[in-house]
Amino acid sequence: KPEKKKDDLQKQLEELKNELASLRVAKVTGGAASKLSKIRVVRKSIARVLTVIHQTQKENLRKYYRSKRYKPKDLRQKKTRAMRRALTTYEKSLKTSKQLRKERLYPMRKYAVKE
C-alpha cells in the first residue's frame, strides 16, 4: 500500500466521522438493517485511520529524539520498574576512596601451594 499523507488521512477521518453521524441518525429514525450493520464497519475504519495517524506520529517523534540526550517517558524503554531503577554498569563499578585505600594497603595475598 502506498503511504498516505497526513492531510489525506485527516480528510478520510472527517468523511468517516460524518458517515458515522448520518448512520446514527438513520438508526434513530429507523433506517434499513444494512445501515445499522454498517455502523460497526465505519467505527472500525475510523479506528484504523487513527491507528495509522498515531503510529506515524510516534515514528516521527522517535526519529526526532534519537540523537537527543533525554526522551519523553512514553518513548523510553519500558522494561520493569526494578530494571529502570537498577544501577548502570558504570555506577556499579565505582569505588569509594576508603575502599580504594584498603585495596591499596592490603592487596590480595598470594600463596605458593606445594603439591
Image (cartoon, rainbow, N blue to C red):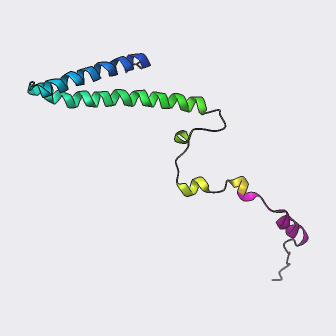
| Location of residue 64 in the rendering, given as x and y in whole percent from the top left corner | 59, 29
Question: Which secondary structure dominates the residues rendered in magenta?
Answer: helix
Q: For the N terminus, give its image quadrant.
A: top left
Taking the spot 66% from the left edge, 56% from the top edge, the residue there is 87
- Visible in this render: residue 5? no
The outermost residue toward the bottom is: 115
Please tell me whether residue 102 is drawn above or below residue 13 in the rendered image.
Answer: below
Taking the spot 23% from the left edge, 21% from the top edge, the residue there is 19
Count of marks, rendered view: 0
Q: In which quadrant of the rendered view does residue 115 lie?
A: bottom right
| Location of residue 98 in the rendering, given as x and y in whole percent from the top left corner | 85, 67
Q: In which quadrant of the rendered view does residue 107 lie?
A: bottom right
Q: Is residue 36 left or right of residue 91?
A: left
96 part of magenta stretch: yes
Towards the viewer: 104 or 30 = 30
Taking the spot 54% from the left edge, 30% from the top edge, the residue there is 61
Q: In which quadrant of the rendered view does residue 94 lie?
A: bottom right
| Location of residue 99 in the rendering, given as x and y in whole percent from the top left corner | 82, 67
- Visible in this render: residue 54? yes
Q: Is residue 92 left or right of residue 48?
A: right
Q: Is residue 101 left or right of residue 53?
A: right
| Location of residue 111 in the rendering, given as x and y in whole percent from the top left corner | 85, 78
Please tell me whether residue 58 is drawn above or below residue 18 in the rendered image.
Answer: below
| Bounds of the magenta segment | 92-107
83 part of magenta stretch: no
